[in-house]
């Protein structure tokens, strides 16, 4: 069964022949390779491109490496990258005329000097280059310097809920429950039965993600890294920072880990796209608050597998789903802070900070969003909209709830919408 990824396919189509290196990034197993080598490849064929003008090469494929006289096992043993001279010779042998050639290159970070190789192909007018990579190093400052502004990123996430529902055999209510439990990694979604899905997720963590991170970061104390993952998994949607996490390690684990080491581990987790941060933003002061911040998992199934499916809070899971959806749609997402000064019953002045779950920005558009699992009464609703009423700008304000409601605006112009309508309509915010 094929899961269509039209959202990302259209991004690639719009970038055809733009003179840039199209870099598809994203967490391992989110579907990058399938998007490039199957979905986009089929699009090129359907568009009339001859198959011999499409060159596909996967640098983690033993069969592909044999084509250029390389051995995957030897590369692993020698802890080196693929020889760029051998690869370029292979490409040269495939280019037989001056027509347009499409290079679809998978896991490009395994090629030595890949920046120079790709820049070389960009100088050829008959080369349109597309690559995938599984870590943020591809777009780090060093790589950006090498590409000299010639890289064009398409960041890919696991399946959105709308994509998930195209292959889910059930209604949207049961679908969301399963989506929040097992996530949207395509190979997991297509498995049958909860036990099989859970086993696949746990295997992905141990055999791919942990191994990749420890290898790339040369992590010696793997236990500390795994403990940090467990702590972050147990506290999605909670404010934290390396110092606070260090105190947790010392009080619970009796560990002497430093905040600098924790900060380094968090960087590794972000580079692998396992987690993403949300910074705090002072809405009135129009300034960022450096610490603490929140962390969300790019896939909830992976998060749940990390803690053996023991701790499943729908409120935090729903918040994580909304965050991922907003990021997938291209928004930058912060945690809003609204400072207020109030008097208590005794007349004492107190300073407080009210929180807006998400401040979402895209170009000149901004939205304030509260994630409310349920709105059982007016008291709960008043609690959710209180931060909104302290914001004195005219940007759109919205409550997303798991309650089954028709979208409606209240007397303050605040929109309330069900999470089902929000997730299943990618254009909802722009309407």
Image (spheres, rainbow, N blue to C red):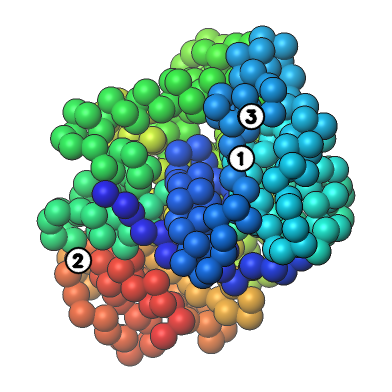
Q: Which numbered marker is on residue 67? A: 3
Q: Is residue 38 above or below residue 98?
A: above
Quadrant for the C terminus, please. Answer: bottom left
In the foreground, 359 or 89: 89
Q: Disc 1 designates what residue?
A: 57
Q: Examine the rendering and report whether any part of residue 26 can be seen.
A: yes
Would you say 120 lies left or right of 219 here? right
Give 334 or 393, whichever is nearer the viewer.
Answer: 334
Q: Where residue 192 appears, x then y in whole percent?
A: 18, 37
Left or right position of 127 against 49: right
Residue under the point 35% across and 80% down: 415
Q: Nearer the viewer, residue 110 or 430?
A: 110
In this rendering, which labeled residue sits more in front, label 2 or label 3?
Answer: 3
Q: Nearer the viewer, mark 3 or mark 1?
A: 3
- Residue identifier under label 2: 403
Of callouts 2 and 3, the N-terminal one: 3
Tag 1 or tag 3, which sits nearer the N-term? 1
* Alpha carbons under labels 2 and 3: distance apart: 56 Å
């Amino acid at each position: 069964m094929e899961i269509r990824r039209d959202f990302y396919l259209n991004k690639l189509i719009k970038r055809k022949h733009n003179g840039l290196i199209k870099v598809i990034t994203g967490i391992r197993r989110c579907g990058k390779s399938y998007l490039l080598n199957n979905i986009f490849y089929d699009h090129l064929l359907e568009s009339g491109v001859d198959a011999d003008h499409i060159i596909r090469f996967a640098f983690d494929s033993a069969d592909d490496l044999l084509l250029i006289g390389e051995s995957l096992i030897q590369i692993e043993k020698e802890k080196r990258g693929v020889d760029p001279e051998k690869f370029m010779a292979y490409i040269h042998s495939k280019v037989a005329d001056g027509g347009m050639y499409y290079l679809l290159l998978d896991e490009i970070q395994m090629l030595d000097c890949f920046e120079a190789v790709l820049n070389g192909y960009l100088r050829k007018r008959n080369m349109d280059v597309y690559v995938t990579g599984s870590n943020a190093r591809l777009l780090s400052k060093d790589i950006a310097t090498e590409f000299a502004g010639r890289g064009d990123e398409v960041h890919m996430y696991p399946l959105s809920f709308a994509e998930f529902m195209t292959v889910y055999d059930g209604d949207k209510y049961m679908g969301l429950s399963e989506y929040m439990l097992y996530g949207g990694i395509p190979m997991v979604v297509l498995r049958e039965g909860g036990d099989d899905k859970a086993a696949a997720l746990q295997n992905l963590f141990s055999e791919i993600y942990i191994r990749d991170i420890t290898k790339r970061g040369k992590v010696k104390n793997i236990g500390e890294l795994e403990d940090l993952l467990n702590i972050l998994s147990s506290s999605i949607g909670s404010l934290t920072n390396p110092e606070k996490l260090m105190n947790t390690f010392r009080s619970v684990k009796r560990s002497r880990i430093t905040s600098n080491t924790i900060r380094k581990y968090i960087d590794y987790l972000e580079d692998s796209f396992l987690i993403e941060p949300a910074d705090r933003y002072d809405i009135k002061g129009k300034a960022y608050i450096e610490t603490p911040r929140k962390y969300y998992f790019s896939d909830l199934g992976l998060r749940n597998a990390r803690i053996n499916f023991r701790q499943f809070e729908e409120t935090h899971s729903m918040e994580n789903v909304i965050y991922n959806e907003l990021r997938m749609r291209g928004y930058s997402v912060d945690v809003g802070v609204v400072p207020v000064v109030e008097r208590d019953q005794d007349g004492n002045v107190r300073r407080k900070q009210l929180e807006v779950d998400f401040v979402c920005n895209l170009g000149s558009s901004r939205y304030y969003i509260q994630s409310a699992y349920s709105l059982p009464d007016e008291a709960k609703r008043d609690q959710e909209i209180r931060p909104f009423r302290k914001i004195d700008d005219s940007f759109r304000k919205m409550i997303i709830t798991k309650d089954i409601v028709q979208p409606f605006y209240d007397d303050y112009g605040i929109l309330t919408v069900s999470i089902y309508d929000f997730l299943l309509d990618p254009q909802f915010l722009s309407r």
